[in-house]
């Protein structure tokens, strides 16, 4: 016990007066029981999604111009320079895929190479197959993805795994 900290006295447990009275302990147990009862029948509530303070229903009704003003600078610039034919075609295909699905089911994936497409509220609920240079990675569009690019959800490389020590150069034989 030559360690400098070992000579310090250990802190004693708090006196019973600080732990709380029996009555306080009983009320906390009652509260816990009440909370358990309240959690049981209650259905899971989903918090309403809002993008920059505007809820989803209003976002869907917005024009491209109003929507553009909500996006960040890079996305605003892209929209202000005009929406080209390819993104419009992709949106049409997504609408068609969504129309043709039964209620409560996921729509058919629409394959695309448009990794630079900005996700707009209209695309929510769709499944997009985003090309990563080798294959199409299916991405289900969720409200949180608004304003991001499709490319952000389709990784182009395989993450490397470190820590495979001693594998280099020892393929065929091991010396004894």
Image: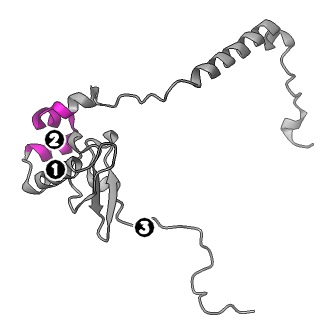
Does label 3 or label 2 sit earlier along the sequence? 2
Q: Measure the alpha-carbon separation of dots 3 and 1.
A: 29 Å
Label 2 belongs to which residue? 76
Q: Which residue is mark 3?
A: 158
Q: Residues within 10 Å of mark 1 (few under 14, many from 20)?
A: some
Boundaries of the magenta span? 60-80
Q: Any mark on residue 176, and which? A: none
Q: Name the residue beneath numbered marker 1.
A: 91
Which x, y percent locates residue 19? 80, 14
Q: Quadrant of residue 6?
A: top right
Q: Residue at x 86, y 14 (%)?
A: 15
In magenta stretch: residue 145: no
Quarter that holds the N terminus = top right
Q: Mark 3 or mark 1: which comes first in sequence?
A: 1
Q: Secondary structure at mark 3?
A: loop
Between 103 and 155, the one nearer to me in the picture: 103
Mark 2, Cα crowd under 10 Å, few <14 / some 14-19 / many 20+, is some
Q: CA distance from mark 3 to mark 2?
A: 31 Å
Quarter of the image where one finds residue 10: top right
């Amino acid at each position: 016990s030559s360690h400098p900290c070992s000579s310090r006295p250990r802190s004693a447990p708090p006196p019973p007066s600080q732990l709380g009275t029996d009555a306080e302990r009983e009320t906390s147990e009652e509260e816990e029981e009440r909370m358990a009862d309240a959690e049981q029948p209650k259905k899971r509530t989903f918090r309403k999604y809002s993008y920059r303070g505007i809820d989803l229903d209003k976002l869907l009704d917005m024009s491209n111009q109003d929507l553009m003003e909500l996006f960040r600078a890079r996305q605003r610039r892209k929209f202000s320079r005009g929406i080209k034919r390819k993104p419009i075609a992709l949106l049409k295909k997504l609408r068609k895929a969504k129309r043709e699905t039964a209620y409560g089911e996921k729509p058919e994936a629409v394959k695309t190479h448009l990794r630079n497409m900005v996700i707009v509220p209209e695309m929510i609920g769709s499944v997009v197959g985003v090309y990563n240079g080798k294959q199409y990675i299916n991405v289900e569009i969720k409200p949180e993805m608004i304003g991001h690019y499709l490319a952000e959800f389709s990784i182009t490389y395989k993450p490397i795994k470190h820590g495979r020590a001693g594998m280099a150069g020892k393929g065929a034989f091991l010396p004894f």
